[in-house]
Amino acid sequence: MRRTDRLFDIIQILRDGRLHRAQDIADRLEVSTRTIYRDMDTLVASGVPVAGERGVGYMITQAITLPPLTLTPAELEALNLGIAVATQIADADLKAAALTLADKIDAVLPTQTIAEADAWKFAVYPFADATHNFTHMPVVRAAIKARQKLRLVYTSREAMVTTRTVRPLHMEYWGRVWTLTAWCELREGFRVFRLDLIESAEALPELFVDEPGKRIEDYEP
Amino acid sequence: MRRTDRLFDIIQILRDGRLHRAQDIADRLEVSTRTIYRDMDTLVASGVPVAGERGVGYMITQAITLPPLTLTPAELEALNLGIAVATQIADADLKAAALTLADKIDAVLPTQTIAEADAWKFAVYPFADATHNFTHMPVVRAAIKARQKLRLVYTSREAMVTTRTVRPLHMEYWGRVWTLTAWCELREGFRVFRLDLIESAEALPELFVDEPGKRIEDYEP
DNA sequence: CTTCAACTGACAGGTTTATGTCAGTTGGAC
DNA sequence: GTCCAACTGACATAAACCTGTCAGTTGAAG
């Protein structure tokens, strides 16, 4: 938990928009510069808009602030979190969607709360958990809808890499990982794939139709 | 990453809704029963609806499944994540809000996509990261809106526990932690509190009004 | 009361992760 | 060219975490 704290502290330091040398940050947080360089790597990989320039120092390159929203309090909180998570995602489409989603909800809700909402300003800063990998979500989701077969390069947990053609059927979110349930043409049976273990996913032109025994309804875990 | 994998495996095993003894799970995953008991702790703390009964075994107590949604693909993904996160939260209001939020979006979007959405079924299972603590969010948010003073019991990172009365002004989400910016009457100055380090938050009947130097606009990090 | 299996606490060993030191390299400004 | 500070890689050590063993306790069912 210590390291997370320090990463948080670094953002707080950078927040002023001014220039900071690794040495100064290191002194302030009582660690070595090497640790700061490593932390900066983590922050950049997490999507924090910080840039370092040799001979100069580190600076926040942008501040991401959203306008006030006008939801019911609890909904606002739920959406708040949702947007925060969605903006963490590397996928640009999803980032944009999270924002338009906010707009849509904003538009459909009664506007009477706008006035009082000005006291509730919030900002969302990207800070992805680099362990998550949502890269293949769009293509997988699209293939499920379009009933397109998928060619997957998949690394199993035993580090075996296989290439297979599957019929994508169903996605689930397990809080830590997303899974894809599919009928695997290589194994001739249902298989559950973890999205974060998919190396590459390519939608094939080949479509598939429901066949008894290969539908999601036929899947029994 | 190994441990996460095993937690995921345990859910997969429990998913069949049948009874499982710790010994059996331990054998299957090739770890000791002690490890399984520890894993079960983690799962329960994460909100996975699993219950153990002495002399009997472990069983999933409920399955949480949501009906199909009808958003644009990207929005669906964004919301998907948002709901997944929101349902992780211990706060019952927020859980409910996440669900009604989904309903509202569902209602306001064009219905033409409903037909094709049936191929896109998804389920969300709670699996909170136990390190997050959103317990005080509702009361803090409410106090900001109502301009009520808050009495905080706060544990600083140096493990110092203080009780203070603050004027809550502004909340921010930093991806890993939420912060509350407030004017602290104990320190006579602006302070930033991390929500996850707040022991207790109590809204006081006492209201506050804007005073020069104590408004969020006057805060300079 | 006995049995079963969930549960708990303490401790030791192993593994992984974090950090510091050091000795470099790189790119821009002057 | 020199200076500056970001950056990188390798290695050793220290701290944190994970796991197994063991010796218990607890609660329900028979």
Image (tube, coloured by chain):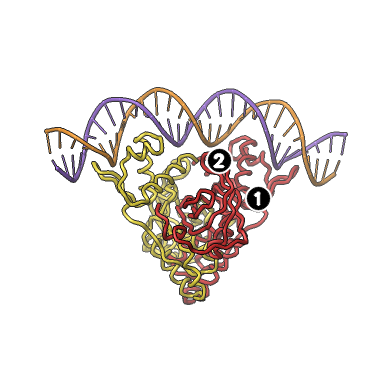
Chain colours: A yellow, B red, C purple, D orange
Is residue B12 in view from this perspective? no
Task: Report the chain holding disc 1.
Answer: B
Measured as percent of width and height from the top left, residue A49 is found at: 34, 52
Give the Cα separation between the discs numbered 2 and 1.
36 Å
Measured as percent of width and height from the top left, residue B185 is found at: 53, 52
Pick whichever, C14 or B163, lies toward us.
B163
Q: Amino acid at mark 1?
A: Val
Measured as percent of width and height from the top left, residue C8 is found at: 69, 37
Is residue B151 in view from this perspective? yes
Q: Badge 1: how crowded within 10 Å, few (<14), some, or many (20+)?
A: some
Residue B50: which disc? 1
Seen in the picture, residue B98 relative to A15 is either above or below; the reply is below
Q: Secondary structure at mark 2?
A: loop
Residue B160: which disc? 2
Pick whichever, B15 or B111, lies toward us.
B111
In the figure, is residue B183 to the left or right of C11? left
| For the residues bearing labels 2 and 1, Cβ distance under 8 angstroms | no
Q: Badge 2: how crowded within 10 Å, few (<14), some, or many (20+)?
A: few
Measured as percent of width and height from the top left, residue B129 is found at: 54, 49
**How many badges with numbers are in the image?**
2
Seen in the picture, residue A91 relative to B31 is either above or below; the reply is below
Q: Secondary structure at mark 1?
A: strand
Q: Nearer the viewer, mark 2 or mark 1?
A: 2
Q: Residue at x 51, y 40 (%)?
A: B2
Q: Residue at x 58, y 51 (%)?
A: B152
